[in-house]
Amino acid sequence: MGNEFYTLHDFMLFTKGAAYYLMGAIVLGVLGFWLYITGRDEDTFIK
Amino acid sequence: MSTEPIDVKKNLYTPFNLVVGFILLLGGIVTILRFTKGLGAVTNLSDNNPWGIWISFDLLCGVALAAGGYTTSAACYVFGLKRFHSAVRPAILTAFLGYALVVFALHYDVGRPWRLAYPIVVQSGPTSVLFEVGLCVFLYLITLFIEWVPSAFEWLGFRKPRDIIVRMTLALTIFGVILSTMHQSSLGALYLIAPSKLHPLWYSSFIPVFFFVSSIAAGLSMVIFEGSLSHRYLHDKMDATYLAEHDGVTYGFAKGAAMVLTLYFLIKVVGLTLDNNWHYLLTGYGAWFLVELLGFVALPAFLYAIAVREQNLTLIRWTALLTVLGIVVNRFNISQVAFNWQLPSADRYFPSVMEIIISVFVVTLGLLAFRFISSRMPIFYEHPDFKEHEPIDLHEHELKSHPQTWGH
């Protein structure tokens, strides 16, 4: 946002770099979300 | 469960029948107009907007919401989650009727409907994405018909052909999953050809992936939604096994839908990042995009998670409705709202009343067909002559396995 890109390489470097950081956060986030959903499974019939 | 023949004489003039009769009458009149006067007489379609509400709703939404067929049968037969077995037949029926009505509605939309089968039998266009969609829908409709037909054979007492088809179940399921994966994504791929027409927030090179992943969430939510309605209005057609497994199906599918919606939300954000489209979020279209992404994707994912954790069936059912609406909003955004977004408003498309009547007419036909079939054929129960499972003592089963949820 607000960045000036003069070459396709600059653009790809910026967007792919941001996406890699995002994917790292996603792995942790999805793991946390899964633990939240299944957190009470032992108490219920959903195995 | 009732196996008594239905008394068609009673309650003929119910509010439901009167409303349905009125819709069928209007639909019949518009159908005659469409096929005698042409598309121009009943639609607002133009060269700028050749794809209207019949494509957006009847086709794009219809195909996405019929995804419950392949998701349920894949869960049961491919992934071996046999506790979802009782949900397979209603899901297959919904999918079969959904696809049949997609093809039915296409006859209204194409200029020369008698040529609808040309790509299959006369001249294919293997370089076209639309050809792939057409071929897959054609093959998948046949597959769904074969998957559904054992119910009809059981109803008619045709044991031998029924047994032959039942033995093909796994192969049919795998074939159906392959076809669905291909055409659900290809429906999104159709829009890859129009980067200058589709707003950048909705256009992405990942749009086939978005369509496919969202169709899984749509299918799971549609099974929950349809199951809730059936539970309410067709309760007397359900046997003990179906009733015993119903809550487990709802919780299992809600958990799956929560994860798939989360995944869908995250890949949409990745798509936004890779195209560096963040600045569009500050525009009017950006606000609407955020409504779709936060209100109809992130919110239902969160609500599903809470509902599964808190064992709240009512919340799951409302969330399923929200998700279904979200898929409709998404398909309308891509095919109408954000399509041709740079055209002046005078050149934009808005459906005519007659187009809307036909869409309502098609949905009504689907509802009637579903009610007709599920009232007569073994959809929500196992036919007594074709039982494969031991009957379940409902009360005992519930006490053992669903101690907290029975009674909803």
Image (cartoon, coloured by chain):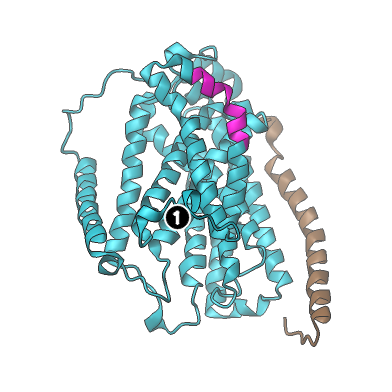
Chain identifier for the cyan-coloured part of the image: B
Point out residue B142 in the picture as x, y percentages from the top left corner: 48, 38
Q: Residue at x 57, y 27 (%)?
A: B169
* Quarter in which the N terminus of chain B is drawn: top left
Point out residue B386 in the picture as x, y percentages from the top left corner: 47, 14
B7 displayed left or right of B298 = left
Q: What secondary structure is marked by label 1?
A: helix
Task: Identify the magenta region.
Answer: B162-174
Q: Residue at x 64, y 49 (%)?
A: B260
Q: Is residue B54 above or below residue B178?
A: below
Quadrant in which residue B58 is drawn: bottom left
Instruction: Name which residue type carries label 1.
Output: Leu
Point out residue B319 in the picture as x, y percentages from the top left corner: 51, 49
Q: Chain of mark 1?
A: B
Name the dominant secondary structure of the magenta segment.
Answer: helix
Query: Where does label 1 land, which residue?
Result: B59
**In front here: A25 or B200?**
B200
- Chain A: what color? brown
* Residue B321 falls inside the magenta stretch: no
Q: Is residue B353 above or below residue B306?
A: below
B13 displayed left or right of A19 = left
**In front here: A16 or A33?**
A16
* Residue B165 falls inside the magenta stretch: yes
10 Å crowding of disc 1: few (<14), some (14-19), many (20+) = many
Point out residue B327 in the picture as x, y percentages from the top left corner: 51, 56
**In front here: B126 or B75?**
B126
